[in-house]
Image (cartoon, rainbow, N blue to C red):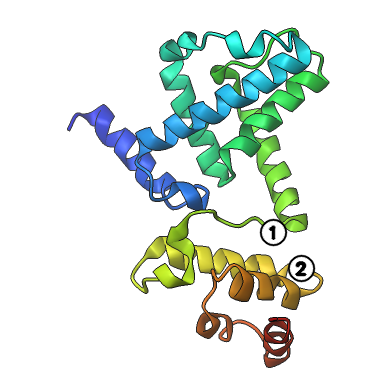
Amino acid sequence: MTCCESIHFDVEEILKELKWFDYRFMKPNQATLLFARHYVCIYKEFYAKTKSVNGADDLDFNFLKDMAGALRDARRAADRIGCRYGFYIRFAFNRAFEQASRFLPLPGKLCEETLVLDVADAWERWTKVSLQLAGSEHYLNKNHRPDCPHQAAYHTYLIEQVKQREQPHIALYRVMCKEEMLPEDIARKHFSEDVMKKALSSRP
């Protein structure tokens, strides 16, 4: 392993503990490919909105092959925040749209530090008003493994999110009973008996 490869490896190991939960079981190149797919979809959407509705599906994205490094860096920026890739990219495109930019943002623009900071603020605000849940089956109770650090981190995240709600028992019912992502025995360690009773009584 070269020095450069070692640095990249270390960065990805750190990001593995920070990125949005659905991406933590992916290899770095898989995550970058997923980021690129989101980028293409959102680019087409905004191209249709600002340029040509009929031409969006005929766009040639071969230019992205020369921007693989920028896509990777933009994906890493999203991973630093811990947000969904679609959220990150859409924020950047919305900003360009609001500023009446003549050009849709290329991957390199998605790496600018001012953008990263603003997306981080927006993501924090969004998670306070909208409970964000992972979509991967890795996080379902039926797949729970006590030795899995990603699942443990997700449980901590869910507990923090539930506690921020005005009516925590409603959110707790959702993550514990409806979505089955937070084991009851773990929830009991962090919530009062009153909150637990209210959450469990909401079950059909």
Q: Secondary structure at mark 1?
A: loop
Left or right of residue 80: residue 126: right
Where is residue 74 drawn, in percent x and y?
A: 52, 28
Q: Secondary structure at mark 2?
A: loop
Which residue is the site of mark 2?
165
Residue 171 visible in the snapshot: yes
Nearer the camera: disc 2 or disc 1:
1
Left or right of residue 31: residue 117: right
Q: Is residue 63 above or below residue 21?
A: above
Residue depicted at x 71% and y 70%: 171
Quadrant for the C terminus in the image: bottom right
Q: How many marks?
A: 2
Where is residue 179 drawn, in percent x and y?
A: 59, 67
Left or right of residue 168: residue 56: left
Q: Is residue 45 above or below residue 129?
A: above
Where is residue 144 drawn, in percent x and y?
A: 41, 71
Going from the N terminus, do you reach mark 2 or mark 1 first? 1
Q: Given the current orientation, which residue lies at the most extreme left position?
A: 1
| Cα separation between marks 2 and 1 | 9 Å
Where is residue 85 drawn, in percent x and y?
A: 57, 37
Residue depicted at x 72% and y 15%: 48
Residue type at mark 2 is: Arg
Q: Is residue 180 above or below residue 196?
A: above
Which residue is the site of mark 1?
131
Residue 111 visible in the snapshot: no
Residue depicted at x 50% and y 53%: 21
Task: Mark 2 and mark 1 in contact? Answer it, CB < 8 Å.
Answer: yes
Q: Nearer the viewer, residue 58 or 45?
A: 58
